[in-house]
Amino acid sequence: MTTALLLTACGGGDGSPKATDRTAESDRAGTAAASPPMSAPTDADRPDITLPSDVKDEFEGWKTGDATKNAILADAGRAQTATNHAIIKSNPDDPALAFYRQGDALVGGARWVKSFVDAGITYTGTVRYFRPSVTLHGTTSAGVTFCTDESKAFNKDVKTKKVDRTPGTKNSFVYYNTHLKRAENGVWQTTQLVSERGSAKCTR
């Protein structure tokens, strides 16, 4: 989903937003007129997850030499952006959230978004996603790990629009370990998500 409401939302745990954390559930995020890491398959009627111009998701190294892994990474990224979209919209029931998340990851994501709503906070700025890794488990299941850098994402009060530009620390870096399953429409949905803030896997 964290001091100041981090964007990251931990799918497997709960956590209320705090003043210094920027994104997460250990789920959070930002995307300026978000562009997905790669083009989406045409067989699924995907929801619009375009973010406002002051919010941006940056995906680094999000393509491999393998088409299947590219598709998995693309949807793993969209699951993050969909969560950010729900935060921006102050809507835990945003349809995009359930489109890219299911199971524990959906429950945790909705809870994380609600914590932002309850705190009267949204966010602005950029979240960087990097060091992705994909492990296939058969043809319909996969594990994806990646890091985020939330040092340039800041909590914003919904009513006053005041931005809390707290300087980033090692806790601005979050390590994600996720599980995805391929749905009938071809979308790789995140079903489990665990995050670790300040992980050495992302700060070194």
Image (cartoon, helix red, strand yellow):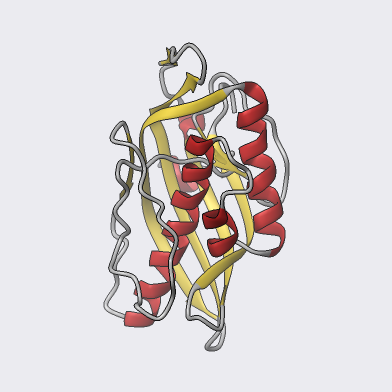
* Residue 33 placement (x, y as % from top left): 30, 45
* Residue 26 placement (x, y as % from top left): 60, 42
Question: Which quadrant is home to the N terminus?
Answer: top right
* Residue 163 placement (x, y as % from top left): 42, 15
Which quadrant would residue 69 be assigned to in this image?
Answer: bottom left
Left or right, 114 with respect to 37, comes to right
Residue at the extreme bottom: 139
User: Looking at the image, which is closer to me, 69 or 31?
Assistant: 31
* Residue 131 placement (x, y as % from top left): 38, 55
In the image, is residue 48 above or below residue 46?
A: above
Which quadrant would residue 134 be assigned to in this image?
Answer: bottom left
User: Looking at the image, which is closer to me, 33 or 20?
Assistant: 33
Residue 134 seen in this snapshot: yes
Q: Residue at x 56, y 21 (%)?
A: 4
Residue 197 seen in this snapshot: no
Question: Which quadrant is home to the C terminus?
Answer: top left
In the image, is residue 92 above or below residue 179?
A: above
- The number of callouts visible is 0
In the image, is residue 136 above or below residue 127?
A: below
Left or right, 133 with respect to 36, comes to right
Q: Residue at x 55, y 83 (%)?
A: 184
